[in-house]
Structures are given as structure tokens and as C-alpha cells.
């Protein structure tokens, strides 16, 4: 079974994976160069990183068909470190980033993705789509009409080529766009910006490179904050991208294996003179839309990237940026969840707020971690508020008016504890109070504290209090932390009054 699965991952879609990997490799080149420029390092640092990370994750990543390489989100976090300490410290931070991600995989932090709601994922996707589109704007401002014409032609090819009989479905339209516009640009001799204008492409293979930094505690103090931030953002983007590719392909992936794979890939990148990277939603979408499904597509993307950059760099330099801009605009359009706009009226207000705030924070800060953190926080608060509303207490007085029974329904926790307490009438004169907790669950110390106060107040009023129906989990936390049966602690809880 395992052998069949491996065979399917590598050989189940050879033609689609090779063609899709080629498209991705071409689209990776300007992005890797651009991200290197953002980080303040030589273009080859980003290109070597993209090659290395893609190849390693092809073998040991947790999600077949997902593309990992140097990314803008990671590059933004490196700027200060490179400016203040230089490339060698960045390479050291990249190695430490990998170590932290491997540790995260082994302690199963990938499982935390279950806490990220669908609204947060949708917001994350929409924000990335907007950022991908915004990243293309510098290539479309202060340019001649030729650039707009080429970009429009590129979009036309991408969207219309698949409708051509026979060949339309067999060759990825983004690849046709890139090759076609490059030939047109060369033939017409158009004076427009090309990949060669982005920076010098490397002409040698990467070599093993141990960072030239002192192995001291002071070095660790310098690189650890950056490595921790890179590890968190890298894992977040990788796991979110894995979730999105899962949805696009109707398959599942191993999130904890992905954490380990990304970590090993970053260590490999650091040792070959590359910067830290992670999964790329834009390139992963290009891969899936171009027919890539297996690990072969990721391997082809990494290998073709290196081969083209090192051995075909002269030809690559002629690719017009307008062709790649067209591909990335297609990615942004395909990535954006247009259904989320249509469903704004039908979805709950809380889900819409979480989605939109995630978009706003990510676009405003250009930091994916901040957006996801805000989204998860808001989703948690809305959930806690919603669950608190489902907690209520029934009150029943016995026929002889001597016993009052309170039947508690729902979840008692920090947000519903005050509501729980307010449902009891402490001034009523009764001999006995029965609190029926058969339909309730106590979750935390706030809930236990609320129960303590209710029991103690009734006893102070002279009533005999009996608790009924605590389930095992609630009984465990109440027995461990409750003090209503401990006279020494009662005065502390009630404040001495």
C-alpha cells in the first residue's frame, strides 16, 4: 500500500507534473530575485534557496504538489538582520530556523491548524491574492503602452488557450504565455523590462557554505529572535498553503511532516548559501492549475530552476516581465475566494468580521502571522461569546416551598461564569437548595470559582446545598480546585465578608 502511494506521488501524473513544474520554475525566477532584493542580498541567495527548498520538500515534505521556495513574507523579516549584521548572520539564522521548525514538527505543532477557522483561512487566501496583485503594480506603473498590451495579451492567452481543441488542455496556458510573449518581444525588439533587468543571474552551481559567524552565545542572541519569527511565519504560511492545496485537490496532507520537511529544507538552504523560505501559495496554485499533483512537479520546479538559471541564463534574461505579471495576475484572480464576497449576506456576521479583519491586517502589515493571529483571536472570542449564550438555568420550587432546585444547562467557563452566578436567588428563604448539573459542563477555574461562590452564599443564608449530576470531567476539576467544602479556604474566596 505504501509502495503504491509512493508510486502515485511520483509517477502518477508524469506529463502534468513536468509541464506544471516547468511553468513554476519560470515563474519562480523573478520572484526569487525580487525577494532577494527585498531582503537586501544578492539575487543568487534567493535563487539557490528556491532550488534547494523545492528539491528537499519534494522528497520529505508532507504535501505532494505544493511548491516551497524563497518567499516575500520571509524576506521582509530578514531586512534588519541583513542590514545590521550581514549575509553570514542571515545564513546562521536560516539554519536555526530549520532546527526550530523540525522541533515544532516533532512536538506536533502542525496539529494546531485545527484551531484555525475556515473564516481565517478564507481571509488569509484573499489577503494573499491582494498582496500578489499589489506586488505586480510596480511593473505596471510608469511604463509604455507596450507593457499593458503585452500583459493583456498574456492574460488573453492564459484564459483563452485552454479552449483550443486538442492542444488547449494538454499544454499549460501560462507556459504558452511565457514562451509566446518572449518570442514576440524578441521578434519586435520591444524596449520593455525583462528578467535580465531584475539582476544578475548566477552562472555557477551552489556550493556547501558553513556560515562564518562566531559560535557564541552573543551570536545566538542576535539570530534567535529573527529565527523564531521566520520559523513561525514559515510554518504558518506552509500549513495554511497545505490546507488550501488540500481543498483544491480534495486530498489530505501530513501537517507535522510538513513542519519537519520545511525545517530540513531551510537547513539545506542555509548550508548552500540560500535564505530561509516556506510554501508559496501563488506558485502552488500555478502548479495545481497547470496540472501538477505529485511530488515530481515540485522536484521538476526546483531542478529546472537551477538548470535554467545556471545554464540558460542568457535566454531567461529575455523573458519580458509583462508575461510573468500576467501569470501572477492569473494567480491572484484564481487565489481570491470570490464565493466569500457572494456569501457575505448569508454567512454569520462574526464569520464575515473574522474574514475581513484577517484580510485587513495581512494587507496592512504585509505580515501573515499578524493577520492569522488576529483572525484566530477574534474567532475564539466570537465562539466563546456564542457558547456563553447557550448556558441557562431552570428554577423549580417544591410543593412545600422548602426546596428550590436549579437545573443548569450548557457550558460554564470564563465567559459564562457571571451569567451562571446571576441566575441564583440568594435572598430567597428555603431550607434546601439542589443544584442539578447533569446537563452542564465546568471547563475552567472561573467556572469552579463561580460554583464555589454560589454554594458558599447559599450556605451563609442557612440553606443546605446539594450538588447533583456532575460528569466525571467536571467533577475532577471541581474536586481538585473547588473550596466550598474546605472551611479554611472559604473566607479567602468570599473576601472575608
Image (cartoon, rainbow, N blue to C red):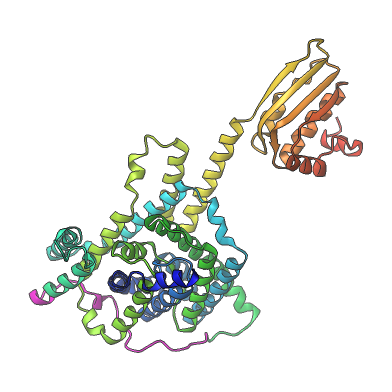
Seen as rendered, the residue at the extreme right is 488
* Residue 285 percent across, percent down from the top left: 34, 61
Seen as rendered, the residue at the extreme front is 1
* Residue 455 percent across, percent down from the top left: 81, 29
Does any portion of residue 450 appear in the rendered image?
A: yes
Position of 133 with respect to 85 (left or right) is left
Position of 313 with respect to 480 (left or right) is left
* Total numbered circles: 0
**Stretch of the chain drawn in magenta:** 186-211
Does any portion of residue 201 appear in the rendered image?
A: no
Picture quadrant of residue 23? bottom left
| Residue at position x 36%, y 44% in the image | 340
Foreground residue, 29 or 52?
52
Work out whether 152 lies above or below 223. Answer: above
Query: Does residue 194 belong to the magenta stretch?
Result: yes
Position of 352 with respect to 409 (left or right) is left
Work out whether 198 lies above or below 279. Answer: below
Picture quadrant of residue 489? top right
* Residue 242 percent across, percent down from the top left: 44, 61
* Residue 169 percent across, percent down from the top left: 21, 63
> Taken as a whole, is the magenta stretch helix, strand or loop?
loop
Task: Name the quarter where the C terminus is drawn.
Answer: top right
Foreground residue, 291 or 2?
2
Foreground residue, 357 or 18?
18
Picture quadrant of residue 477? top right
| Residue at position x 53%, y 55% in the image | 113
Work out whether 259 lies above or below 412. Answer: below
Work out whether 496 lies above or below 160. Answer: above
Amino acid at each position: 500500500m505504501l509502495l503504491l502511494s509512493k508510486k502515485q506521488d511520483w509517477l502518477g501524473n508524469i506529463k502534468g507534473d513536468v509541464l506544471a513544474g516547468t511553468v513554476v520554475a519560470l515563474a519562480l525566477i523573478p520572484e526569487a530575485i525580487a525577494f532577494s532584493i527585498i531582503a537586501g542580498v544578492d539575487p543568487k541567495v534567493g535563487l539557490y534557496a528556491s532550488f534547494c527548498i523545492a528539491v528537499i520538500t519534494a522528497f520529505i515534505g508532507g504535501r505532494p504538489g505544493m511548491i516551497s521556495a524563497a518567499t516575500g513574507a520571509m524576506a521582509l523579516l530578514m531586512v534588519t538582520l541583513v542590514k545590521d549584521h550581514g549575509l553570514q548572520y542571515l545564513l546562521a539564522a536560516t539554519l536555526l530556523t530549520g532546527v526550530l521548525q523540525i522541533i515544532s514538527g516533532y512536538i506536533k505543532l502542525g496539529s494546531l491548524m485545527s484551531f484555525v477557522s475556515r473564516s481565517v483561512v478564507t481571509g488569509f487566501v484573499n489577503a494573499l491574492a491582494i498582496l500578489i496583485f499589489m506586488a505586480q503594480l510596480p511593473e505596471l506603473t510608469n511604463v509604455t503602452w507596450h507593457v499593458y498590451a503585452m500583459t493583456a495579451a498574456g492574460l488573453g492567452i492564459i484564459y483563452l488557450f485552454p479552449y483550443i481543441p486538442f492542444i488547449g488542455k494538454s499544454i499549460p496556458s501560462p507556459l504558452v504565455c511565457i514562451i509566446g510573449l518572449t518570442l514576440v518581444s524578441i521578434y519586435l525588439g520591444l524596449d520593455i523590462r525583462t528578467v535580465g533587468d531584475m539582476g544578475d543571474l548566477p552562472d555557477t552551481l551552489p556550493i556547501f557554505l558553513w556560515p562564518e559567524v562566531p559560535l557564541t552565545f552573543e551570536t545566538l542572541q542576535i539570530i534567535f529572535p529573527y529565527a523564531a519569527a521566520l520559523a513561525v511565519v514559515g510554518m504558518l504560511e506552509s500549513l495554511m498553503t497545505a490546507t488550501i492545496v488540500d481543498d483544491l485537490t480534495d486530498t489530505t496532507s501530513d501537517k507535522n511532516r510538513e513542519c519537519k520537511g520545511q525545517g530540513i529544507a531551510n537547513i539545506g538552504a542555509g548550508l548552500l548559501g540560500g535564505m530561509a523560505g516556506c510554501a508559496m501559495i501563488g506558485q502552488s496554485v500555478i502548479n495545481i492549475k497547470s496540472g501538477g499533483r505529485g511530488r515530481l512537479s515540485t522536484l521538476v520546479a526546483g531542478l529546472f530552476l537551477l538548470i535554467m538559471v545556471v545554464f540558460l541564463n542568457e535566454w531567461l534574461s529575455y523573458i519580458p516581465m509583462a508575461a510573468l505579471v500576467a501569470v501572477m495576475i492569473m494567480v491572484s484572480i484564481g487565489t481570491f475566494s470570490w464565493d466569500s464576497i457572494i456569501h457575505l449576506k448569508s454567512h454569520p456576521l462574526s464569520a464575515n468580521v473574522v474574514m475581513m479583519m484577517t484580510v485587513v491586517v495581512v494587507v496592512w502589515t504585509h505580515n501573515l502571522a499578524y493577520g492569522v493571529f488576529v483572525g484566530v483571536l477574534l474567532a475564539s472570542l466570537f465562539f466563546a461569546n456564542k457558547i456563553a449564550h447557550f448556558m441557562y438555568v431552570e428554577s423549580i420550587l417544591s410543593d412545600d416551598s422548602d426546596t428550590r432546585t436549579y437545573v443548569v444547562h450548557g457550558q460554564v467557563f470564563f465567559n459564562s461564569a457571571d451569567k451562571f452566578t446571576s441566575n441564583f436567588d440568594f435572598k430567597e428563604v428555603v431550607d434546601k437548595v439542589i443544584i442539578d448539573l447533569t446537563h452542564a459542563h465546568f471547563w475552567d477555574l472561573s467556572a469552579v470559582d463561580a460554583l464555589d461562590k454560589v454554594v458558599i452564599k447559599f450556605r451563609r443564608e442557612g440553606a443546605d446545598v446539594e450538588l447533583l449530576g456532575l460528569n466525571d470531567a467536571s467533577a475532577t476539576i471541581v474536586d481538585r480546585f473547588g473550596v466550598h467544602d474546605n472551611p479554611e479556604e472559604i473566607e479567602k474566596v468570599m473576601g472575608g465578608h
